[in-house]
Every structure is written in C-alpha cells, then in structure tokens.
Image: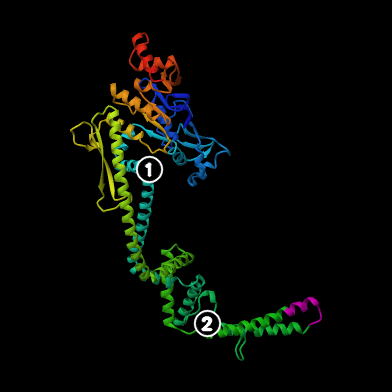
C-alpha cells in the first residue's frame, strides 16, 4: 500500500504531499490544472525515464518520494536480498525516491541510500499496477495478452510456463552446441596448425633468430656481424693464440711473469699481480670454449631455411594475435583446449543427438501441458470479462480469447500466441481488440481485467483517466466497479467524472493558480462539504446552483 506521495518542483507543482488511504483514492481538478503530474511522478517512482522539461522552471531539481508498507514476505525472496540490505534493521516501511536535475540527470534512492532506476522497477512492479492511457496500446499487444492469460491461470499455470521455458532453453542450448560441432571440421585443421606453431616458448623464438643470423654468416662465408667483432676464423686465435703464435693470453702471461718477479716488494703490487694472474686463467678458458664453439658451426642451408620459415610464421602469428609472443602463447592454450574438445567431437555428437531426442519429447509434453492450461485459463477469463463488461454498461458485449498456433510449432513462450477478440454489440462478429474497440471500450476492458487479478496480487492499482471518453450510465457503472475493486486493495484514480469522485474514500483536488510569473498547481485533501463542492463543480454547476449542490450532496451521501 502507498501511504504517502511527496512531490517537489515537478512541472506545475512546487510542493505537494498526499496522505493516501486504503480503498478508493481519487484526484480531480480542472482540465489543464496538472492532474497528469501525479501520473508523471508515479512513473518516475517506478523507474521510468524522465521527460524533458519536467523540472519546474527556476528550480534546480525535482524530487518524488513514495512511502510504502514493506511486505514481510519480501525478506525471503532471494532476488531482493541485495536491494533490501539498504534498509535499516526492523524496517516496516519502504521509502523510494527519485531526483531529477534541471539538466535531465536522475538519481534513485531506496531507504535513503543510492540505488538505480532498475532497483525501483524491481520493487515497484511488486507494489503498483499502473493503468494509464498508454495501457490502451499495451492491451492490444499479443505478448501482453498472452501474459494476461497465463496470469489468469494462477500459480499452476506459472509452474507450467516455467517448466516449458526450462525445456526450451535446454533444447536450444543442445541444438546450438550440435550446430557448432558440425561446423568445426575445417576449424579443427586450422586450430591444430596454429597450436603446432604456437607450442614453443618465447625464448625459443629469440634463440631461433640468433641461430638464423649465425647460419646466414656460415652459409655465405662472410665476416660475422659487428656484434661479433672479428672474422670467425681468427676470433679464437687472437684471444688464445695458436701453436707458436702470439695471442692475448700469451701477452697477459708475460705481464703476469713480469709483475711476479718483484713479488713481496709491495703488498699493493702483490694484489695487482694476483688479479693479472686471474685474467690469464680466464682468458685461456674463454679462448678454448670460443674455439670449440666456432669449430662447431657448419653451413647448413636446410636448417637455415627451416628457421627462416618458422620465424616468419611466428611473426605473422604475433601480428594476428595481439602483437606479442605472450599473446600468441595465450591463443595457443585456447587452441589446445579446442583440440581436446574437437577430438571428442564424434562421441559428443552422438551424445547430443540422443540428448536432443529426449529433450524434444520433454518439450513437446511441456508445450501440451502449457497449451491445455492456457485453453482453460482463456475460457475462464473470457467468461469473467464478458460478465464484467455487461456490468460496465456494455450489454451484450463479449470478449473471446483465441489461441493461435505459431508457424514453427513452438517458440520461447509456447506453441501458440493469443488474440483478444471483442464483439461490442450483440449480433456482431468478434474482431481483434486492436481493430474494433474504441477508447472507452478499451478502458472498460482494462478495468474488467484489472479487477480479475490473481487472489494473491495485492498491488495498489493506479488508473490514469481510464474513464476518458465515457459518461452517463456508463460512468456510473465504471465508478461502481472501481469502488468494488477497492474493497480489498488500494486504488488511486485520476478522474474527471463525478460518478467516480463521489465514491472515493479519500479525495484530493489539484488547482492551478497564476499569482506570479510562473503558474503553480496546488494539491488539497478534501473532506465533508469540500467534497460536495468539488463534485458539484465536476457536474458543471456554479456555486450558487442549489439544486446541483443538493444533488451532489445526495450523490456523495449515497456512497458512504
């Protein structure tokens, strides 16, 4: 139940606070006074998009806040845990808020803490059912009609629908996997090739590049690159020397001998002599290893060609998969996983075909159960709405609900769609609701459907001028129907009909004044004689019309 609605700087309203009650609440006022502001405020509170120019001229922001009773059962709903954690412990009320800046930016609040518009939608769809002029269009949409039929089937139909959707999802997933598997034959070969190329570590690539350089030199007989210093044939000789030749190690040895001849003369000189001797030993070791390495290099054109091809392939893979060898290796890991999956493709294909055969049987049974439930719910809903339409001054009108099979046999919502067919007068053929119903007829169909909600649906019902386009006895029937619906739930009706207003348990009026450069709308709660005066105004009578005043008083008194 919506207890309070507070509005600040929204369109014509500078500040308003509505203390709503149980039963039937109505908002009335002259045309253009701002009754639709209430609809705008509720739309914002329900997570709707802020319309341009909705902030009152001269104000920095608009604010809407609603205070609701907090259903205790919500705390057992897993899907609401994260949102309800924002509320103080032991809360019995839920405060929802929406702020709109003059620039159009919006903020949402739950329990005074930041939230999202999606959070508001999740909560308010459990609290409010909004029936406005836009619902005329929604009522003609097949998917909305299908949802109404399923809703009329109660919890049992909800379970049938859930079972069908579960079977549908499983079959779709299995079918998708099988289609992917059957289309992977060529991918398997490409993936295997890519994996083979990617199977080396990044340091192998570096060594391969170096080896290519050396083999190129060996194959051409040219000098080593600048990095290597001397021609290959003299490198070791220059360092270690050959038989009878002079090398760096021989010169170092001579220097070591010379320094050693004066050993013991000076401790500092002895240290230097030791270091020179170490250099001699290190140079001899390096020279021996260098000679062995260079002698092991032989011209190998075939090996060079292999390295050239492999490095070229690795370069292309780097460009294709992210620009670095690390990215290439990541792709290689994915390829290995794909190969493992593809190698078991034949057995998995057989498993999937068997699984699909079972799933199709399960889906067929679930679809048949869902159709049977819809057929029963459609019949009952049709009978109930037809009865209500006769009570709403549409004598002889009938609403028929047809189930129409979908072309492919089954879709995500079942094996059929729904079409509401209305015959507004006796002897007329039923036509699709979207083609045959006037605005007033759609309003009454909506009202009939709203009053036939499931027994556990205790949402507050909001009617935004649902009585537009009707009058006389029809208006009286609509007012009586609204009063009946409001006996076990809260109803808020924005109306221009005295037949509806006179039946209100709580009455608000909105009036527009132009006391300054900016028009201002004021919302007032009416009681007693003020209600009579407003009903008389809605009847089109002046304040001095005693007969109209007496009639208005009698009309209000007869309803309370």
Point out residue 354 in the picture as x, y percentages from the top left corner.
Answer: 34, 65
Quarter where residue 400 is shown: top left
| Residue 545 seen in the figure | no
Q: Nearer the viewer, residue 295 or 223?
A: 295
Query: In this picture, is 238 found above or below 103?
Result: below
Whether the magenta-drawn stretch holds residue 268 is answered as yes
Q: Which part of the image, by quadrant, shows the C terminus? A: top left
**Relative image position of residue 193 (x, y in whole percent):** 39, 72
User: Would you say the residues marked 2 and 1 are in contact, meaning their CB atoms lie under 8 Å apart?
Assistant: no
Q: In the image, what residue occupies the spot 18% across and 34% down?
A: 428
Q: Secondary structure at mark 1?
A: helix
Q: Position of residue 408 (x, y in %)?
A: 26, 53
User: Magenta region: which residues?
Assistant: 263-274
Question: Alpha carbon of mark 2 to alpha carbon of mark 1: how far?
Answer: 92 Å
In this rendering, the answer to whether 167 lies above or below 10 is: below
Q: Quick one: 80 or 178, which is closer to the camera?
A: 80
Give the SS element for disc 2. Answer: helix
Q: How is the image coloured?
A: rainbow
Q: Which mark is residue 154?
A: 1
Residue 492, visible in the rendered structure: yes
Q: Which residue occupies 29% across, 50% down?
A: 415
Q: Residue at x 33, y 53 (%)?
A: 366
| Magenta span contains residue 340 | no
Left or right relative to 240: residue 361: left
Q: Which residue is mark 2?
A: 232
- Determine crowd level at label 1: few under 14, some 14-19, many 20+ residues with C-alpha closer than 10 A: some
Residue 125 in the image: above or below residue 321: above
State the image coordinates of residue 511 (x, y, percent, origin top left).
Answer: 41, 19
């Amino acid at each position: 139940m919506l207890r309070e609605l507070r509005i600040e700087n929204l369109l014509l309203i500078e500040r308003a606070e509505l203390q709503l009650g149980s039963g039937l609440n109505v908002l009335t006022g002259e045309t253009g006074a701002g009754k639709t502001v209430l609809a705008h405020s509720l739309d914002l509170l329900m997570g709707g998009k802020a319309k341009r120019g909705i902030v009152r001229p001269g104000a920095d922001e608009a604010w809407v806040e609603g205070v609701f009773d907090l259903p205790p059962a919500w705390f057992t709903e897993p899907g609401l845990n994260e949102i309800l954690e924002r509320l103080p412990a032991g809360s019995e009320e839920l405060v929802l808020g929406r702020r709109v800046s003059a620039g159009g930016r919006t903020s949402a609040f739950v329990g005074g803490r930041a939230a999202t518009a999606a959070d508001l939608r999740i909560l308010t769809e459990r609290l409010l059912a909004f029936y406005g002029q836009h619902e005329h269009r929604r009522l003609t949409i097949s998917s909305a009609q299908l949802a109404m039929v399923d809703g009329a089937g109660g919890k049992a139909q909800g379970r049938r629908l859930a079972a069908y959707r579960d079977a549908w999802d499983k079959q779709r997933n299995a079918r998708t996997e099988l289609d992917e598997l059957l289309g992977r034959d060529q991918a398997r070969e490409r993936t295997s090739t890519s994996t083979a190329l990617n199977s080396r570590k990044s340091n192998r690539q570096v060594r391969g590049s170096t080896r290519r350089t050396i083999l190129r030199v060996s194959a051409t007989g040219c000098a080593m690159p600048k990095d290597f210093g001397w021609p290959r044939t003299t490198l070791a000789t220059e360092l270690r020397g050959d038989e009878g030749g002079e090398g760096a190690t021989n010169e170092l040895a001579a220097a070591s001998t010379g320094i050693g001849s004066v050993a013991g003369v000076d401790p500092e000189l002895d240290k230097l002599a030791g270091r020179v001797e170490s250099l001699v030993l290190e140079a001899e070791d390096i020279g021996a290893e260098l000679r062995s390495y260079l002698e092991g290099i032989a011209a190998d054109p075939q090996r060079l060609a292999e390295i050239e091809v492999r490095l070229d392939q690795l370069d292309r893979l780097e460009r294709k998969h992210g620009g670095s060898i690390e990215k290439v290796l990541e792709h290689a890991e994915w390829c290995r996983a794909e190969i493992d999956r593809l190698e078991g493709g034949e057995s998995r294909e057989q498993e999937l075909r068997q699984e699909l055969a079972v799933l199709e049987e399960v889906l067929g049974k679930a679809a048949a159960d869902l159709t049977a439930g819809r057929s029963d719910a459609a019949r009952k809903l049709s009978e109930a709405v037809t009865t209500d339409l006769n009570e709403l001054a549409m004598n002889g009108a009938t609403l028929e609900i047809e189930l129409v099979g979908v072309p492919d046999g089954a879709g995500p919502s079942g094996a059929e769609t729904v079409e509401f067919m209305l015959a507004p007068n006796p002897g007329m053929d039923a036509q699709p609701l979207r083609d045959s119903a006037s605005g007033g007829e759609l309003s009454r169909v909506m009202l009939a459907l709203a009053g036939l909600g499931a027994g556990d649906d205790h949402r507050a019902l909001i009617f935004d001028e649902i009585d537009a386009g009707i009058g006389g006895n029809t208006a009286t029937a609509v007012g009586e129907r609204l009063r009946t619906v409001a006996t076990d739930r809260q109803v808020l009706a924005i109306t221009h009909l005295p037949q509806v207003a006179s039946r209100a348990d709580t009455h608000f009026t909105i009036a527009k004044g132009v006391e300054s450069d900016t028009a201002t709308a004021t919302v007032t709660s009416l009681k007693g004689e003020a209600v009579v005066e407003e009903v008389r105004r809605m009847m089109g009578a002046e304040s001095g019309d005693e007969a109209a005043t007496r009639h208005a008083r009698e009309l209000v008194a007869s309803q309370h």
